[in-house]
Amino acid sequence: MKKFVNTPEDFVPEFMAGVLAANPDLLEGNLEYQMIKRKDAPRDNKVSVIQGSGSGHEPAHVMAVGPGMLDGACQGPVFAAPPVDACYETIKALATPAGVLVLVNNYQGDRMAWDTAVEMAQGMDDIKVDQFIINDDVAVQDSLYTVGRRGVAGNFFVMKCCGAAAEEGKTLEEVKAVAERVNANVRTMGVALTSCIPPAKGTPIFDIGDDEMEVGVGIHGEPGRERAKIKSADEVTAMLFDAVATDLPFDSGDRVALMVNGLGGTPPAELYVIYNKAAQLCADRGLTVARNYVGEYCTAIEMAGCSITLLKLDAEMEAYLEAPATTACRIF
Amino acid sequence: MKKFVNTPEDFVPEFMAGVLAANPDLLEGNLEYQMIKRKDAPRDNKVSVIQGSGSGHEPAHVMAVGPGMLDGACQGPVFAAPPVDACYETIKALATPAGVLVLVNNYQGDRMAWDTAVEMAQGMDDIKVDQFIINDDVAVQDSLYTVGRRGVAGNFFVMKCCGAAAEEGKTLEEVKAVAERVNANVRTMGVALTSCIPPAKGTPIFDIGDDEMEVGVGIHGEPGRERAKIKSADEVTAMLFDAVATDLPFDSGDRVALMVNGLGGTPPAELYVIYNKAAQLCADRGLTVARNYVGEYCTAIEMAGCSITLLKLDAEMEAYLEAPATTACRIF
């Protein structure tokens, strides 16, 4: 297994310990529950925005904790939902009178864990807490681990805008409304060139031929729309872009944020080849790219591949994306 | 070939066009010479700091151009030095009365190209220009493409400190002295778990067994100290760290910057597993990690692997590292 791992069981707590060691002034954690939080959270007059999912998608989510982004996050094992008790303890650790908003990427395992944890926090501890489900992936309606559309890299924009809105002192209902508006206006689709190897499995999560790609792949390697022969970068970009841009649809004159997200094993230069074409396709459609993001935002361990995300902006969203944020990964 | 590429010949100009498209306010380029520069450079009263090398090491170097970092950079093809005319045109484009400092990673091809270009600029154009050679890699004394030690990820610290010093208005001689001091105090060693595929070659640049790693690898896949069986993350970290830390040597009580650099195909979580152990090893030696860097700073296309860099700090270097910088990659 071509990985930097000690034992598969220790992989998640050890990388989280690394994140904490690298950010001692910013973050603190409770590794018993694989949870990381802002040192200065919770604050009484501020809504806490939290998230949690399987590991292997870094920087999502524990590396996205910090001022202007998430107040806290918990991780499950690689590609498995966090346990209910981790979700519950994370809600409790970030509870404030202003309330807690849980952002959940739409995967059945995550939803089940958070549903239960939210009920426990409400019923047993009288904590003000609400959830919002992110489902930006246009590839397929239902999938291996999901009913409805999956939540993938568009999640970044929901976190960023909600983080900024909460920092401004918005109420729980207002922050949730921001999540709804961003999610309603964000669309993503990805493609995988290779599989990936969860440390505990030790073998690739799916097989793929040397000349094949999986179009519309999920961030756990779930099948997408089709298994196709590898095409040129421009053809792949056009395929992803068209699927995304026609879904909302985006209209000529729209201001957008454009993200090219690496899935973990694709180097920076290739992501910029994709960005170059995607920016041209935006111009062709009359879309103005007001903000752009090229890098690793939501990965599938070391999978070679990428996703394209478009967010239709309004003035409030632009201001939220512009707002300062400080996290373990410095890409926001 | 599991890559996002159109044609191998277009790969470098296309990713550079992507970098320019993503940073229209910050950067401008001359893709005939595969050169990118700050829009606001050159400035008469400021030393220009430039660099250039083969492509495939992104974000080094064209994604490291911007205020507080490089004033300009040019790229060669993947893993090949930039042509002399590209180096010459880059010097001319950034020439100022205050002078130009060229930072060269110690590879024979790069040195030959820059030596000639510097001579041309001095002789034909009377441009004030000097060079500094970076050689931070402790792995081997001579290597496949290098006489003396290679210049690798430690290059980041030289760029950052020289960029900050030049921004402060230091003279060419003073900025070069900063480069000398940083280079004298920075040490790196890397390890590869996989090979990588230059687009124009289409096949791996070296063969490596499923259970093997190359210890002390160069950033073009050059052999290092030994071909060994893969070990645990902690063992690999200790091996790299000890090689680096005993070279200067670093002493108990030193303040250091610690970088864990991904070589392109290793995901963020694994880099933090390495960081976690490296930070412990710093503590064991009485080194205080004043600043840390975990991510991709100098890659070898999609190679799975990492390097560890230690920089022994003084107050001036700390201030330079703290100084603001804005580049295409937002990791500084």
Image (cartoon, coloured by chain):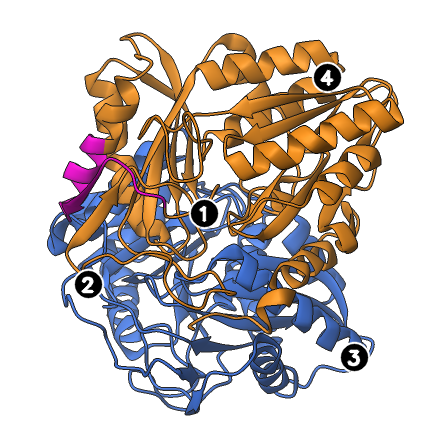
Chain colours: A blue, B orange
Q: Are marks 2 and 3 on the same chain?
A: yes
Instruction: Pinpoint residue B210: horizontal percent, then vertical percent.
Output: 18, 61
Query: Looking at the picture, does residue B143 appear above or below residue B96?
Result: below
Task: Read off the residue under disc 2.
Answer: A83
Instruction: Pinpoint residue B68: horizontal percent, then vertical percent.
Output: 67, 29
10 Å neighbourhood of mark 1: few (<14), some, or many (≥20)?
many
Q: CA distance from mark 2 to mark 3?
A: 46 Å
The span shown in magenta is: B222-239
Instruction: Pinpoint residue A160: horizontal percent, then vertical percent.
Output: 55, 56
Q: Are marks 4 and 2 on the same chain?
A: no
Q: Residue at x 47, y 42 (%)?
A: B298
Can residue B237 be seen here? The reply is yes
Q: Mark 4 or 1 closer to N-term?
A: 4
Q: Which tag is nearer the camera, tag 2 or tag 3?
A: 3
Can residue B69 be seen here? The reply is no
Task: Read off the residue under disc 1.
Answer: B299
Q: Are marks 2 and 1 on the same chain?
A: no
On the rendered structure, is A100 left or right of B224?
right
10 Å neighbourhood of mark 4: few (<14), some, or many (≥20)?
some
Q: CA distance from mark 4 to mark 1?
A: 29 Å
